Every structure is written in C-alpha cells, then in structure tokens.
Image (cartoon, rainbow, N blue to C red):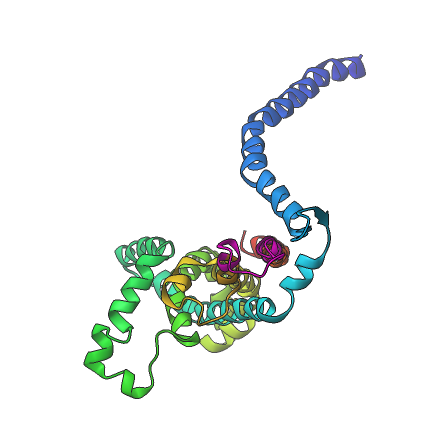
Amino acid sequence: MTATAVRVDTAPAAQVKRRRRSLGWIAVVPLLAFVAVAFGLPAIAMLDGAFTAKDPATGATSYTVDNLTASLKGAYLTALLGSVKLSAVSAALATAFGLPLAQAVVSSRFRGLREAVLTASGVLANFGGVPLAFAFVATLGNAGVLTRQLGLTDKGWDLYSFWGLVIVYLYFLIPLMVLTITPALDGLRTQWREAAQNNGATGVQYWRFVALPVLLPTLLGGFVLLFGSAFAAYATAAAMVGSSIPLVTLQIADAISGNVLVGQENVALALSLDMVLVAGLVMAVYLPLQRRSARWLA
C-alpha cells in the first residue's frame, strides 16, 4: 500500500521536472540562434577562406593549407610573436600592479572610496581605441604636454615604442585586473588571517602561505583574461604606432586592405584563425582556473 502511494506521488513530480527542462531549452533557443548567426556563420566563413586559395592565372579556387603555412612564416610569424610578447608583458605588469591596488581598496574603511575606485575601474577598463591613443599622444607623445615640460625626449622617452605601447595598454588592463581580483579578495575569510596570527605568523607569512596560494588560480585566470584582452586590441595600436611595431592585428588589417602579394588574399583569414586558436588555448587555461578558485572562495 505504501509503495503504491509513493509511485503515485513521484510520477507527477518527474513529469513536472521534465516539463521544466523542456521549457528551459525553449527559452535558450533565441540565444543559441543569435550565437549561431553572429558567431557561427563568420567562423564558418573564416575557416572556409583560411583553407581556400585562388589561382591568379585561371581564377579557380581550391582547398589548401598554403594560407596557414604563409601565416606562420616571415613577417606574419614575427607579428604573431610580437602580439604574444606585448600581451604577456602587459598582462604580467597589470597583474602585479592590480593586486595591491585592489587589496588597498578592499581593506579600506571608506566605502565611498571602494565604490569610486570600482566605478572608475569599470569605466577605464572599457576606455580604449582611438580616444585612448589620442589622449596619450597629446600627453606623452613627441610634442605632448608632459613630454615638453619634463624634457622626456632628451631622457630617451619614446611613446611610439614597445614599452610605450605597454604603458598605454596598462591604462585599461590594470582597472580590468582590479575588477577581476576584487571578488576573490572579498572571499578571503577573516578567520584565516586570525588563525595565522594566532599561530605566530606575520603579515608577510600570511600572504605567502595562505592568501597567495588561495588566490593563485584567480591571479592566473586574471592574467589569462588580461592576455586575451591585450591580444585582441587593435584600434589603440593602429592609431599610435601604425606598422612600426609588428602586431598580428595590424597585419590582418593590412591583408584585408589588399596590402598582400597576389594569391595571398586569404592570408588575413588564416591569421584570424591563428588568433582564434590562441584565444581557444587562453580560454582552455582560464576556465579550469576559474572553477578551481570558485571552489576555494565559495
């Protein structure tokens, strides 16, 4: 009698769960359709073009790996490595500077300061492109205000160099790191610090043996996120340095504009595929780190 009652009660519940799951999938359909149109179709076109070559003489097209081979040689490879180097250096410096800044904000007793810094970080993290390049050129360019007042040119300062571009990238990468690491710093429990102090640990020892090991996945994940942001940046570098610094985004722009040899019109798509592969590797590293840090700081 009891078994029959249980079956009667659980059957409708199972049906309700299945119905909710089906309705959930229906609600996701518009998002999936948007992703398919906005990202799927361009991705398919990029893949098709990256493996397609056109014969200059006959105009016939054929599938080949020549575009990918060309994208990993000569100036194209130099540009790809230049973007990786610029992104890695900028992300590493932004991580190093962003952590203590975020800790100062989190540990501050003034709530207004925290809100002001986080709000400003949200704005500055999205401030880039031509306006950012113009601001730095007007301030620290060859004829910039600070450059003339401080005589930076005589001291060897050059904004239109690798390190000049790194400084410009730090302008939006450091605020992005502050936004990324602040929730993790909020997740550090006060009991951990108190326990460390009760066992005679100093502040440095607490950070070395407790806080930093817990924050390490988040720090690495933030570094990867900053790397991807810097790696994909285009407008700022294009407005500032043009082609004086080899970057893969600038090479893609040149190839799209037709500044390539005959028969290499689709090299830009191959370079874009290289960037997608690098971004895929970045996300493959970032997602596990994010899940691991979430388990510690939950």
Q: Position of residue 292 (x, y in %)?
A: 61, 56
- Magenta residues span 253-273
Identify which residue, 57 or 80, lies in the foreground.
57
User: Residue at image x 67%, y 19%?
Assistant: 13
Looking at the image, residue 36 lies above or below residue 181: above
Whether residue 292 is situated above or below residue 168 in the rendered picture: above
Answer with left or right where residue 86 lies relative to residue 161. Answer: right
Q: Quadrant of the N terminus?
A: top right
Residue 252 drawn at (x, y percent): 52, 58
Q: Is residue 257 magenta?
A: yes
Q: Quadrant of residue 178?
A: bottom left
Quadrant of the rendered image containing residue 146: bottom left
- The verdict on residue 175 being magenta is no
Which is more toward the observer, 153 or 91? 153
Near-viewer residue (66 or 105): 66
Q: Residue 286, can we see it?
A: no
Residue in the picture at 63% in, 48% down: 49
Q: Which of the 4 quarters of the picture holds residue 289? A: bottom right
Asked if residue 205 lies left or right of residue 69, the reply is left
x, y percent for residue 57: 67, 52
Q: Nearer the viewer, residue 128 or 184?
A: 128
Label count reads 0
Residue 18 vertical placement versus 254 (above, below) = above
